Amino acid sequence: MKSRPLLYLFSMFIIVPFTTSASPPHSDLPPINVQGEMKANACLPEERESVRAELPEGSADLVETLLCAKKTEASKNYLLRHMSKFINRTWMDENYVERTQRVKADAALAEQLLSAGEAWDVSVEISANRVSITYMPNEACISDRELVRKKGRWMITAIGSACD
């Protein structure tokens, strides 16, 4: 009779912790390995707080939506309300020549801009009414977004990308 309660206690204190710790709490937001250096996902709570602390007032929700929001109609509509009518898109072609094009803001572009949690190694540069966000959407690429405050509202005015 005494062995059952001991077995029960053993299973509660030994087996249960192993099963709950087998999957990390943020397994859907893994780090990436960039040339031997592990980079944390920008959408982990501690990374979000760190980025938010750097951002000027009113821009944090837009940045968080760009980097971490799921690709939903609500997210796309939110971005559309914060996009200039035309956006400068810069990229590197196959010959490593920088190209720039003005593109019309539309739902398809808004969906492309949603990283949906695929964002690592975020850096923020702030100057006057401008915020530049640079991040890695994967191990081989860099993306950037430029926000400008226009009439008290943060707007996406430029985007860019380059890959190895």
Image (cartoon, helix red, strand yellow):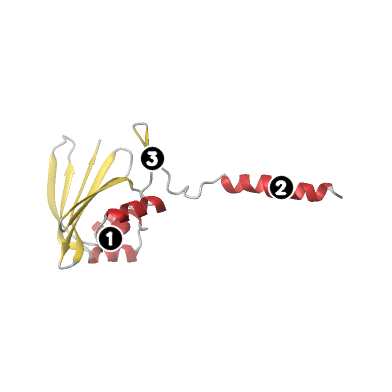
Residue bearing the label numbered 3: 32
If you read the primary sequence from the N terminus, does the residue marked by circle 2 or circle 1 appear first?
Answer: 2
Residue neighbourhood size for the residue with mark 2, other residues' Cα within 10 Å, grouped as few (<14), some (14–19), many (≥20): few
Q: Are marks 3 and 2 in contact (CB under 8 Å)?
A: no
Residue 53 in picture, x, y percent from top left? 31, 55
If you read the primary sequence from the N terminus, does the residue marked by circle 1 or circle 3 appear first?
Answer: 3
Q: Is residue 23 rendered to the left or right of residue 35?
A: right
Q: Is residue 133 above or below residue 76?
A: above
Residue 113 in picture, x, y percent from top left? 27, 54
Residue 128 in picture, x, y percent from top left? 15, 56
Residue that sits furthest to the right in the current view: 1
- Which quadrant of the figure has residue 93? top left
Residue bearing the label numbered 1: 62
If you read the primary sequence from the N terminus, does the residue marked by circle 3 or circle 2 appear first?
Answer: 2
Residue type marked 2 = Ser
Q: Are marks 1 and 3 in contact (CB under 8 Å)?
A: no
Q: Is residue 163 above or below residue 103?
A: above
Residue that sits furthest to the front in the current view: 53
- Which quadrant of the figure has residue 161? top left
Q: Name the residue nearer the viewer: 120 or 81.
A: 120
User: How far apart, in angstroms, are the residues tagged by discs 3 and 2?
Assistant: 35 Å
Residue that sits furthest to the top in the current view: 36
